[in-house]
Amino acid sequence: MTDDKALADRILALKEERDAVILAHNYQLPEVQDIADHVGDSLELARAGASLECPVIVFCGVDFMAETAAILSPEKTVLLPAQDACCPMAEMVTAGELAVLKERYPNAAVVAYVNTTAEVKAESDICCTSANAVKVVRSLHQKQVIFVPDRNLAAYVARFTDKEILPWDGYCLVHDRFSAADVRREKALHPRAELLVHPECRPEVIDLADHVFSTSGIIRHVCGSGAGEFIIGTEVGILHRIRKHCPETRCIPLSPRAICVNMKKTTPEKVLAALERMEPRVVVPQKTAADARRAIERMLELP
Ligand code: 13P
Ligand code: SF4
């Protein structure tokens, strides 16, 4: 038996003993995705976390995702195997800064991208993910919408609504680095390929895309195509799931340097250690969790 197989078997056995479920984001390392019960985008993982019956969730992703699971299921133990796996964009706006903005625009609704801290969600009216941001904003009756923290997702949403979107100036370090020059270079090399990008990309990249989707939306589009050639404008971890489920398609990363280092901090060894020690746990203070839950559940209730 290989070391990897032995490690995976130990994780599986301990997972059963603890009655735990492993959730992994689409950007996780291949070996982590392969030991997970569910792999998905932020919205799918939030829904899975809320609906699972198990007492323990091992969250292979970044902190805000595990926090969302802990907020939705306060009775469950939520483990984040890589305690330092954070999303730098989520740190770009604080609850205090948002409160100041709310005072300046008292009639505006507040939409918090799920890539935010629990404290920011608690200050918000509703959350959104990349999969439902347009739908969330359209569901609001207010004409003005404060949108935190991603300026690029805010600009993307603004294309589909006549509401006044008031964006925060945050951005994803990975997606904001894609440029129109990257697109021109890859399109010249692969002229028949469709360009699929994540809405965290800059407007100049969105303008050139054939389709804009969440991470799972990209996977569904590629796998639904049967075969074909695609340039993928998001973090490269997504390619593992595409290759696994639809190996007949050809996917080229828009940039091979599009790596979210925080998403790569989780390893099978850390998953095993988390299950052994039942640590590190994600715990959100009760009042913050209750306020944040309202904003997340309002999003999940949308049809
Ligand atoms: P998705 O919800 O599309 O998976 O995106 C999460 C994310 O962090 C993108 O950078
Ligand atoms: Fe955050 Fe960007 Fe990493 Fe997604 S890819 S977790 S937005 S830093």
Image (tube, rainbow, N blue to C red):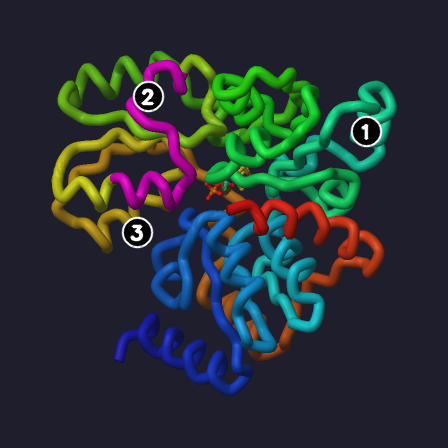
- Mark 1 or mark 2: name the one nearer the start of the chain: 1
Region in magenta: 205-221
Residue 113 belongs to the span the image colors magenta: no
Residue beneath the point at 48% across and 62% down:
23
Counting every numbered tag in the picture gives 3
Label 1: few (<14), some or many (≥20) within 10 Å? few
Q: Amino acid at mark 2?
A: Ala
Q: Which residue is mark 2?
A: 209
Residue beneath the point at 24% across and 33% down:
252
Q: Check whether the beta carbons of the residues at disc 1 and disc 2 lie within 8 A of each other.
A: no
Q: Image check: 62 left or right of 231?
A: right
Residue 212 belongs to the span the image colors magenta: yes
Which label was assigned to residue 241?
3
Residue beneath the point at 65% across and 47% down:
298
Label 3: few (<14), some or many (≥20) within 10 Å? many
Q: Nearer the viewer, residue 2 or 279?
A: 279
Residue beneath the point at 16% across and 33% down:
229
> Residue 244 location in percent, x, y?
23, 55
Label 2: few (<14), some or many (≥20) within 10 Å? some
Q: Check whether the beta carbons of the residues at disc 2 and disc 3 lie within 8 A of each other.
A: no
Local SS, label 2: loop
> Residue 126 location in percent, x, y?
67, 40
Which label was assigned to residue 97?
1
Residue 258, picture quadrant: top left
- Mark 1 or mark 3: name the one nearer the start of the chain: 1
Q: Image check: 161 left or right of 86?
A: left
Spatial CA span between label 1 and label 2 = 33 Å
Spatial CA span between label 2 and label 3 = 21 Å
Q: Amino acid at mark 1?
A: Glu
Q: Nearer the viewer, residue 279 or 226?
A: 226
Q: Amino acid at mark 3?
A: Arg
